[in-house]
Image (cartoon, grey):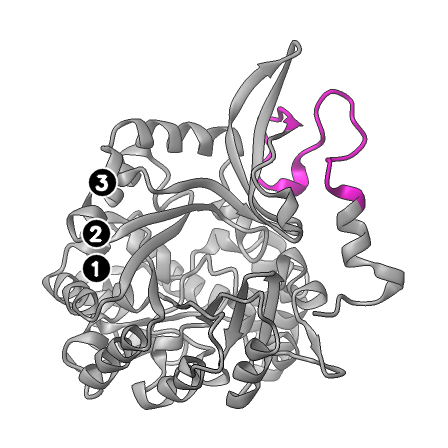
C-alpha cells in the first residue's frame, strides 16, 4: 500500500467524507485549525468503521470533533471562517486558544530539559535519573495524529512550543557523561516517521562500547497502529529491521514501546505481520495507551486489548490517565471511574496480561499510580504510589489523597486526613526552584 496523508488541506478529497454531514465537515475544519489534524489511507480504509459514524472510536481518534473545543472558542474560529478571514487571522486566533490549553503539561519545558556544559538542551528531557528522552527534529510528526495527543504542540506550527534537536553527537555526548543513565527513549512525534538510515544516525553512536552503562534503547511509536507497512513493504523496511538487529547484537535491549488504544487496531493482517517481523529481530514490544472517554472507556475494551496483545506476544505495560492538556475535557474520566474500569478489566484476564500497570498519571512529581479507593481511619481516600519520581526515593511509597468523585488529574487531589501537603512536596519544591534556578543535570 502506498502511503497517502490527509490533512486540513485535502481531507475533503476522501471519498468517505461524503458520509459526513456539512456540519461535521465544517467542525473538522474549525477544530483542525486549532488542534493538529492528520490521518492516512490505512486508517481511513482499514481501521475506521464508516457505518458507525460519528461514534466509531478510530474516527474519534483521528478526526477532530466539535466538542473538542470550548463552545466560545469554536464560535470564534467558526466566525472567522464564515466571514472569509484570511489564514493569518485564523492562525493568530488559533494560537491564542492554543496557549490556553496547557501546551506543555507537567513542567516539560521548565523542569525536564537539562543544562549541560552551560547550555539548555532543547531536544532532550531528563526527568528521571535513569532515562533520557530524545526528540529528533525529523521525528516531530506522525503517520497520523491522535486527537488526544498530549504532544500536540509539536505539530501545531508554533515553533516556540516545539521540543527538538538535530544534533546527533550531542545525545551520545550527554549520555556518556551521565553514568546513571541506563535507558534512552526516542520519542516525538514519532521517530519511526524517519527513514531508517536517518534513525540509524541517531541510534548507532549509542551502541559504542564507550557507553557501557547504557543498557536499553526504547522507541516510542504509533507506527504499528497507523502505518504497519513501515515494517513490511516500505522501501526501507529491511534496513529498519536490520537496525533493530544491530541494537540487539551490540548487547543492548531494544524496547519497542507501541501505542494501541483499541482492539480494532490489532485486527488487520498487516499489523500482525509487522509485529512478527519486529519480534524476529530480538526486540520486545511493550504496549501502552491512555484511557479515553468516547474511545476505550469500558473494562471489556481494555480486557480484549490486553488479550489480543498477549496473543501476539506483546507485553501490556501501561494504562495512562489522559494528561491535562489540549482537549482533555472531552476525553477525561474521573479517577474513581478509571480505577473501577481498570480493576474490572484486570480481574477478567489471566496473569500473563497482568504485567500492565495502571491507572498512571505522568504528572509534575512523577508517574503516580492509583492503587485503589479505601477507607482509612474513617476517611474515604485514594491510595496512591509513584512508579517513577523526580527523586527515586519517592518511588513505591504509598500515600493518600482525599476521595473526590470528580477528580480527573493529580492536580485535582488534596492530601487526606487534613494534611497540608503530600510527603514529597517540600523536596519537590526544592528540586524545581533551587534558588530560582532551573535544575542542572
Main structural element of the magenta stretch: helix, strand or loop?
loop
Choose mark 1 or mark 3, whichever is in front: 3
Q: Residue at x 48, y 82 (%)?
A: 210
Relative to the observer, which residue lies in front, 376 or 283? 283
Mark 3 or mark 2: whose residue is earlier in sequence:
2
Residue 437: assigned label: none
425 part of magenta stretch: yes
Asked if labels 1 and 2 touch by Cβ distance under 8 angstroms, the answer is: yes
Q: Which element carries disc 2, helix, strand or loop?
A: helix
Mark 3: which secondary structure? helix
Query: CA–CA distance between discs 3 and 2?
Result: 10 Å
Q: Is residue 135 left or right of residue 129?
A: left
| Residue contact between numbered discs 1 and 3, judged by CB atoms under 8 Å | no
* Separation of marks 1 and 3 at Cα, in angstroms: 17 Å
Q: Position of residue 382 (x, y in %)?
A: 58, 26
Depth check: give the residue in front, 203 or 271: 203
Magenta span contains residue 105? no
For disc 3, the marked residue is 304
Q: Between marks 2 and 1, how big is the CA–CA gap?
A: 7 Å
Magenta extent: 400-426
In screen coordinates, is 89 left or right of 189?
right
Residue 163 in sight: no
Q: Which residue is mark 2?
A: 264
Q: Earlier in the sequence, mark 2 or mark 1?
A: 1
Amino acid at each position: 500500500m502506498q502511503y497517502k496523508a490527509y490533512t486540513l488541506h485535502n481531507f475533503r478529497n476522501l471519498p468517505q467524507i461524503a458520509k459526513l454531514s456539512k456540519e461535521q465537515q465544517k467542525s473538522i475544519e474549525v477544530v483542525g485549525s486549532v488542534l493538529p489534524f492528520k490521518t492516512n489511507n490505512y486508517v481511513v480504509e482499514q481501521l475506521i468503521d464508516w457505518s458507525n459514524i460519528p461514534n466509531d472510536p478510530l474516527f474519534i481518534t483521528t478526526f477532530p470533533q466539535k466538542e473538542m473545543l470550548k463552545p466560545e472558542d469554536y464560535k470564534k474560529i467558526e466566525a472567522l471562517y464564515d466571514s472569509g478571514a484570511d489564514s493569518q487571522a485564523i492562525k493568530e486566533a488559533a494560537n491564542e486558544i492554543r496557549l490556553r490549553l496547557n501546551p506543555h503539561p507537567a513542567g516539560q519545558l521548565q523542569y525536564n530539559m537539562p543544562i549541560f556544559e552551560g547550555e539548555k538542551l532543547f531536544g532532550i528531557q531528563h526527568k528521571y535519573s535513569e532515562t533520557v528522552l530524545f526528540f529528533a527534529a525529523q521525528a516531530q510528526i506522525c503517520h497520523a495524529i491522535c486527537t488526544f495527543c498530549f504532544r500536540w504542540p509539536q505539530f501545531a506550527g508554533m515553533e516556540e512550543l516545539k521540543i527538538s534537536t538535530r544534533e546527533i553527537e550531542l545525545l551520545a555526548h550527554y549520555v556518556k557523561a551521565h553514568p546513571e543513565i541506563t535507558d534512552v527513549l526516542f520519542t516525538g512525534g514519532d521517530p519511526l516517521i524517519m527513514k531508517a538510515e536517518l534513525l540509524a544516525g541517531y541510534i548507532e553512536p549509542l551502541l559504542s562500547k564507550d557507553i557501557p552503562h547504557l543498557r536499553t534503547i526504547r522507541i516510542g511509536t504509533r507506527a504499528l497502529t497507523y502505518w504497519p507497512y513501515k515494517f513490511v513493504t516500505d522501501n526501507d523496511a529491511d534496513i529498519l529491521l536490520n537496525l533493530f538487529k544491530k541494537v540487539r547484537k551490540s548487547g543492548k535491549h531494544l524496547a519497542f514501546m507501541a501505542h494501541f488504544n483499541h482492539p480494532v487496531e490489532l485486527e488487520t493482517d498487516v499489523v500482525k505481520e509487522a509485529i512478527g517481523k519486529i519480534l524476529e529481530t530480538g526486540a520486545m514490544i511493550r504496549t501502552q495507551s491512555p484511557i479515553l472517554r468516547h474511545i476505550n472507556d469500558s473494562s471489556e475494551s481494555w480486557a480484549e486489548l490486553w488479550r489480543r496483545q498477549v496473543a501476539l506476544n506483546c507485553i501490556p505495560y501501561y494504562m495512562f490517565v489522559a494528561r491535562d492538556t489540549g482537549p482533555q475535557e472531552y476525553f477525561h474520566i474521573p479517577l474513581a471511574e478509571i480505577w473501577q474500569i481498570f480493576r474490572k478489566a484486570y480481574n477478567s484476564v489471566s496473569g500473563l496480561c497482568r504485567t500492565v500497570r495502571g491507572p498512571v498519571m505522568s504528572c509534575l512529581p512523577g508517574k503516580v499510580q492509583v492503587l485503589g479507593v479505601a477507607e482509612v481511619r474513617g476517611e474515604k481516600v485514594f491510595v496512591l504510589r509513584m512508579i517513577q519520581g523526580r527523586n527515586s526515593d519517592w518511588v513505591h511509597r504509598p500515600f493518600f489523597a482525599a476521595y473526590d468523585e470528580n477528580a480527573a488529574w493529580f492536580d485535582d487531589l488534596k492530601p487526606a486526613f487534613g494534611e497540608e501537603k503530600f510527603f514529597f512536596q517540600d523536596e519537590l519544591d526544592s528540586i524545581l526552584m533551587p534558588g530560582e534556578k532551573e535544575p542542572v543535570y
